[in-house]
Amino acid sequence: MVKAADGPGGTALETRASREASDEPRWLNQDELAAWLANSAIMISLPAALDARMQREAQLTFFEYMVLSVLSEEPDRTMQMSALAARTAASLSRLSHVVGRLEKRGLLARSRIPGAGRRTNTTLTEAGYDVVVAAAPRHVAAVREYLIDELEPHDLKALQRIGTAVEAAISRGRTTAAARTTASPGVALEDEEP
């Protein structure tokens, strides 16, 4: 639950340490709540709209398209599964399932990386490249229709700045979580899919 605060939500003098030390949640003020709800609408509605349109126009889910697209941008159209999972913000389990589906359609191929560990490369096939190239103009048209063309130039710069800041905060959180995991004795970490 998100609760709107009665006050401005803290002062510039308030330090992160003092905020974290308090047991009381820092509820969102009215402006923060309005911004959060608008952003939530984007996070929920935009991927759903892109997914529905991609399935209708290209017989791919939005996530499948993103997997193919990321691989198409690599010089040899190949990435290690763990790197591909990071680039698409997916768990290895989810990615492995989707890659298996795309592999059955002949759009991707998986190969084990020699050496210790369970490491796997995923390669975009020629058929997969043809599919992503054919789908790309429709995807860009949807992105323009639903987002880009609705914004002013200064909005685009703000959106870029916001996206960069949010991604940095998420990356810091992942780094902190990874450090805690590797510091825990008895926790086995696999580089690749289950």
Image: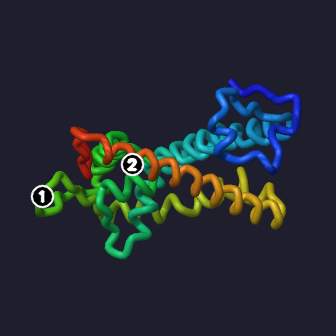
Query: Judging from the image, what secondary structure is the residue with disc 2 in?
Result: helix
Amino acid at pointer 2: Ala
- The answer to whether the residues at label 1 and label 2 have Cβ atoms under 8 Å apart is no
Q: On the rendered image, what quadrant is the N terminus found in?
A: top right
Rendered location of residue 48, percent (x, y): 60, 39
Residue 157 visible? The answer is yes
Disc on res. 178: 2
Look at 39% across and 48% down and name the residue there. Answer: 178
Query: Judging from the image, what secondary structure is the residue with disc 1 in?
Result: loop
**Residue 129, located in which quarter of the rendered image?**
bottom left
Choose between 190 and 7: the one closer to the eye: 7
Choose between 127 and 167: the one closer to the eye: 167
Residue furthest bottom as drawn: 75
Look at 71% across and 50% down and name the residue there. Answer: 146
Look at 69% across and 29% down and name the residue there. Answer: 25
Rendered view: 131 above or below 46:
below
Q: Earlier in the sequence, mark 1 or mark 2?
A: 1
Q: Which residue is mark 1?
A: 116
Q: Is residue 52 left or right of residue 36?
A: left
Residue furthest left as drawn: 115
Q: Nearer the viewer, mark 1 or mark 2?
A: 2
Q: On the rendered image, what quadrant is the C terminus found in?
A: top left
Q: Label 1 neighbourhood size at 10 Å, few (<14), some (14-19), many (20+)?
A: few
Look at 68% across and 41% down and name the residue there. Answer: 18
